[in-house]
């Protein structure tokens, strides 16, 4: 059981990173972006392409870092994939959402547009990389044996550290930098932000870029921990939304708590249920939250921002 | 050529099969038109109601497997009831599920219903995939009885089933059109346009939304039942989100959201485009990429939906302006 909780914390940190970026985007663009999970998958596949196709052809030193399963190529691929995913998200915004903003569409149209974008991104992954599973590496790494039958792979410690430092980095960015403050102001009240001289259209672009880059990181870390497949983003959608709503949608710190909670509950549930039911477990939590405390545990919207 | 030869020719058979499937999808589109077109509710879980309708109808009309079949097939129920009982049961169970999903979500922002309906659709697919005892798990059910099958020669059966689909579609369309034009439907539209105003006029917004959600889901249940009896076999793989949910959205937006005729027209036009794109990808995509070809077609319809949303959000027909009859 303790071992499952530890597994849950690792999954939870990936979900937290995904949910924090989902909720950040939600706070600014003001609709539920159903393409967020697929942006995660895009990030993972771009990194896969860099590591296993481009860098492999360039003969980069493939030696791994100590006990970790990856080395220099992955470290180089990470920022490239973040950048590429940010560009993809901004392109989607340009093609789909910005024309809708210009036409002052109702929020429902954005939501439908994001579902189309989600399936379109997934179709592209299928077309380019096919339906097979892909792995960053075939090498097996021994897990560390800790007391209480806890087994943790060195990769997983890296994943946890990477997720938490990224969320902490976002916190500092939103609090301390001018751009972060402008983003918070836009989330708080777009009209007021515009009057104060903030270019809200530029804030949209930054939001998509930052949100997508974080989503890409989460996708890559998930790919390191498990495997890559085109549906990975879609399957994450329910846990991500459950985490964001549990923490209070639009509230990044809530999303951190929500992600951890969903991750732990999902892993612990595998003691009683088939692991394939994990998305359904997230769904049940989601419904319970909506029934009992729809504003989330930390309160909804921008209060925590 | 004799009439007999024409009626049983391959091309005509293809056409009849095409009309049957398009007609069944028109029912989903009509159901979504109550949700989205009429009330502005975002249901992203059509595949879930599709699955519930299809499985309910199958389990109600199929007998329990006996003899050798029982070794390969498990099912929780096998009531061996007539076709119509299955259709009614499918609608009833879908309505019940819609009621349960609507209670926690319909008081909240519109996105929550979208998320919750995705959740219910995915969960239902997981349950049917994993619970062997319920409906044979991922292998699915075969031998779902086809109504009036033994009363006609097999080569003419598709005409009978097309008749059943057209009749059902006509009854449902007339009923929904009357409802949506009634004062009840006018309240739904007022909620879609501005629910605060509707509430200020003393309308119980939550109750109206719940009724619309249940009604639309029941129509989808009927569609699921007709699908099951036409296909004869169902398995959880049929109810994937792109095929179960997304294409229905494309149909409704294409034909004209808020317009009953548009919802039906959209389904038929979409299937024509879909069938055409199959010929195109068969001709253009090299054989070694066969497993990827369907995704090229998916990408095309996803692009089509975005283009419709941006450049012709009213669809082909658009919503008609009308005054409710008293």
Image (spheres, coloured by chain):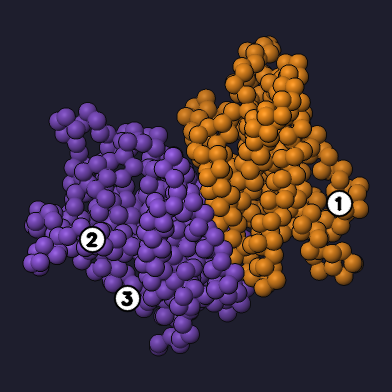
Chain colours: A orange, B purple
- State whether discs 2 and 3 lie on one chain: yes
- The x and y percentages for residue B170 are 28, 72
Seen at 83% across and 56% down, the residue is A183
Seen at 44% across and 71% down, the residue is B255
Q: Chain of mark 2?
A: B
- The x and y percentages for residue A252 are 75, 46
- Residue B295 located left or right of residue B215: right
Q: Which mark is residue A233?
A: none
Measure the C-alpha gap from mark 2 to mark 3. 31 Å
Seen in the picture, residue B12 relative to A74 is either above or below; the reply is below
Q: Which mark is residue B11?
A: 2
Q: Chain of mark 1?
A: A
Q: Are marks 1 and 2 in contact (CB under 8 Å)?
A: no
Seen at 45% across and 87% down, the residue is B323
- State whether discs 1 and 2 lie on one chain: no
Is residue A245 or residue A221 the one in the foreground?
A221
Seen in the picture, residue A222 relative to A90 is either above or below; the reply is above
- The x and y percentages for residue B9 are 17, 60
Is residue A48 or residue A170 the one in the foreground?
A48
- The x and y percentages for residue B45 are 47, 53
- Which of pointers 1 and 3 indicates the residue nearer the eye? 1
- Which of pointers 2 and 3 indicates the residue nearer the eye? 2
- Which of pointers 1 and 2 indicates the residue nearer the eye? 2
Is residue B193 or residue B4 the one in the foreground?
B4
Give the labeled residue for mark 3: B174
Is residue B150 or residue B118 the one in the foreground?
B150
Q: Which mark is residue A180?
A: 1
Q: In this rendering, does residue A145 appear at all?
A: yes
């Amino acid at each position: 059981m303790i071992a499952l909780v530890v597994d849950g914390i690792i999954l939870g940190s990936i979900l937290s990173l995904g949910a924090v970026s989902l909720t950040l985007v939600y706070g600014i663009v003001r609709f539920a972006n159903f393409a967020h999970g697929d942006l995660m998958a895009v990030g993972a596949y771009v990194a896969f392409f860099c590591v296993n196709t481009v860098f492999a052809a360039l003969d980069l030193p493939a030696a791994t870092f100590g006990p970790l399963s990856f080395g220099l190529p992955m470290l180089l691929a990470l920022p490239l994939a973040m950048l590429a995913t940010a560009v993809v998200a901004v392109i989607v915004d340009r093609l789909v959402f910005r024309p809708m903003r210009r036409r002052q569409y109702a929020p429902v149209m954005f939501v439908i547009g994001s579902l189309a974008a989600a399936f379109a991104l997934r179709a592209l992954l299928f077309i380019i990389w096919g339906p097979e599973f892909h792995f960053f590496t075939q090498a097996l790494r021994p897990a560390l044996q800790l007391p209480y039958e806890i087994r943790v792979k060195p990769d997983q410690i890296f994943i946890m550290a990477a997720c938490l430092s990224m969320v902490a980095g976002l916190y500092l960015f939103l609090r301390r930098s001018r751009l972060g403050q402008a983003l918070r102001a836009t989330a708080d009240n777009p009209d007021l932000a515009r009057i104060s001289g903030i270019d809200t259209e530029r804030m949209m672009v930054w939001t998509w870029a930052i949100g997508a880059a974080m989503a890409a990181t989460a996708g890559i870390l998930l790919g390191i921990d498990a495997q890559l497949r085109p549906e990975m983003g879609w399957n994450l959608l329910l846990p991500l939304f459950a985490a964001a709503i549990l923490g209070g949608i639009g509230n990044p710190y809530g999303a951190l708590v929500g992600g951890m909670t969903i991750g732990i509950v999902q892993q612990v549930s595998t003691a009683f249920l088939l692991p394939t039911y994990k998305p359904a477990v997230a769904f049940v939590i989601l419904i319970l939250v909506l029934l009992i405390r729809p504003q989330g545990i930390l309160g909804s919207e921008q209060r925590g921002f | 050529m004799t009439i007999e030869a024409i009626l049983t020719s391959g091309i005509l058979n293809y056409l009849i099969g095409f009309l049957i499937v398009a007609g069944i999808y028109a029912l989903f589109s009509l159901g979504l038109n109550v949700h989205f077109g009429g009330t502005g509710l975002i249901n992203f879980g059509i595949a879930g109601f599709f699955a519930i309708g299809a499985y309910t109808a199958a389990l109600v009309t199929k007998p329990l497997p006996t003899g050798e079949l029982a070794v390969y097939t498990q099912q929780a129920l096998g009531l061996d009831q007539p076709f119509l009982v299955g259709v009614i049961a499918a609608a009833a169970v879908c309505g019940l599920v819609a009621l349960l999903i609507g209670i926690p979500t319909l008081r909240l922002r519109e996105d929550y219903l979208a998320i919750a309906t995705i959740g219910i659709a995915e969960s239902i697919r997981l349950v049917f995939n994993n619970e062997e005892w319920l409906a044979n798990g991922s292998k699915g059910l075969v031998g779902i009885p086809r109504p009036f099958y033994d009363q006609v020669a097999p080569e003419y059966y598709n005409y009978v089933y097309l008749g059943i689909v057209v009749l059902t579609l006509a009854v449902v369309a007339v009923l929904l059109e009357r409802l949506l034009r009634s004062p009840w439907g006018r309240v739904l539209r007022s909620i879609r346009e501005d629910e605060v105003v509707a509430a200020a006029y003393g309308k119980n917004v939550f109750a109206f939304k719940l009724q619309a959600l249940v009604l639309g889901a029941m129509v989808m249940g009927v569609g699921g039942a007709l699908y099951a009896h036409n296909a004869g076999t169902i398995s959880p793989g049929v109810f994937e989100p792109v095929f179960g949910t997304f294409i229905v959205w494309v149909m409704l937006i294409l034909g004209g959201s808020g317009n009953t005729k548009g919802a039906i027209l959209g389904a038929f036009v979409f299937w024509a485009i879909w069938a055409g794109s199959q010929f195109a990808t068969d001709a253009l995509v090299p054989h070694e990429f066969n497993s990827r070809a369907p995704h090229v077609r998916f990408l095309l319809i996803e692009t089509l939906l975005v283009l419709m949303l941006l450049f012709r959000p009213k669809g082909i027909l658009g919503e008609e302006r009308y005054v409710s009859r008293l």
